[in-house]
Image: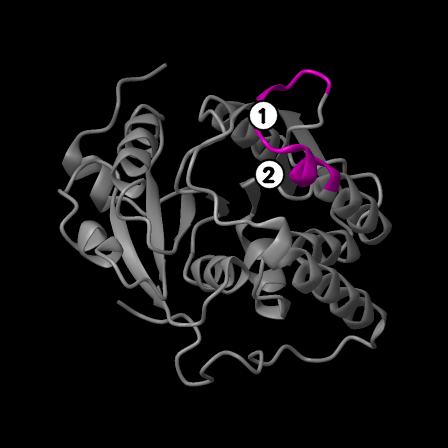
Amino acid sequence: MPPSPSRDEGTSRPPLLEIVIPAHNEERRLPGGLLQLCAKLARLPFPTAVIVVDNASTDRTADIVRDWPRGPVPVRLIRCPVPGKGAAVRAGLLGTSAPFAGFVDADMATDLDALDVAFGQLLSGERVVIGSRAHRDSHVENRHSRIRELGAFGFRALAGALVRGVSDTQCGFKFFDGVLAREVAARLRTPGFAFDVELLARCVREGSAVVEIPVRWHDMPGSRFSPARHTFGIVLELGRIWLRLRARPRAAAPPSWEAPLDPVGSP
């Protein structure tokens, strides 16, 4: 592999790949996650960049990004005042301009070695490449409770009816052709946990197959998902997604929860 680009080279050329990190009150996990991601990207033989979306945080998440030291991988901040991972990912993808774009979770639960495989698939012509914990070659460390596992099984069954042939819609490791990512993000209307289902379903609607790749995934502490608090809302979100996908396509307009004059939320 060619040597890593110098600081000047890495920051003067436009990125070929931009990666979004949605972050809500991630002051404890974000520094380590950013360090891992930037170290991985700095070893790649092409320019990259990272966008951290501060999703209505009330802690020092935004300060961490603003104070991040300059290096071969530029890191910039976007603000998304609307709570919800879907809203944050939408804002982040709309803030990209690179030929390829994607997003990962702040905890880096998915081993970043999968980036090499994902980017190779994109270069070969695939337009949607996602990590799948259900892939037969994946290695998954799972410490979830029995109740959460049952909830996940039910969710997969419902999601499978909307995105057929995809075994894991929720792994926080997804990469796209940049143009497709921005087109689909503009139509995304699900601000919460189930946004991945709508995002993938709209990609399929655009004629793009979803390629699932194996990952090494580690169950990280600090997850905010609670079956008791979130299950009912997620079922409602899936129902709304089903209705939206059945509706006649219309010109993209900002969702009702987004300020129309500031769709990305500049830092």
| Label 1 vs label 2, nearer the camera | 1
Q: Residue 17: where, in percent of width, then height? A: 42, 42
Q: Nearer the viewer, residue 247 or 138?
A: 138
Mark 1, other Cα within 10 Å: few <14 / some 14–19 / many ≥20: few
In magenta stretch: residue 12: no
Element type where label 2 sits in the image = loop
Residue sitting at 46 percent across and 67 percent down? Answer: 83
What kind of residue is marked 2? Answer: Cys
The image quadrant where one finds the N terminus is top left
Q: Quadrant of residue 57?
A: bottom left
Colouring rule applied to residues: one colour
Q: Nearer the viewer, residue 264 or 139?
A: 139
Q: Nearer the viewer, residue 90 or 224?
A: 224
Q: Quadrant of residue 62?
A: bottom left
Q: Residue 105: where, in percent of width, then height? A: 45, 42
Residue range corresponding to the magenta coloring: 136-150
Q: Which residue is mark 2?
A: 171
The numbered dot on residue 142 is 1
Q: Nearer the viewer, residue 215 or 120?
A: 215
What kind of residue is marked 1? Answer: Asn
Mark 2, other Cα within 10 Å: few <14 / some 14–19 / many ≥20: some
Residue sitting at 13 percent across and 50 percent down? Answer: 67
Residue sitting at 68 percent across and 80 percent down? Answer: 251
Q: CA distance from mark 1 to mark 2?
A: 13 Å
The numbered dot on residue 250 is none
Element type where label 1 sits in the image = loop
In magenta stretch: residue 147: yes
Report the side of 201 relative to 189 (left or right).
Answer: right
The image quadrant where one finds the C terminus is bottom left
Report the side of 177 relative to 42 (left or right).
Answer: right
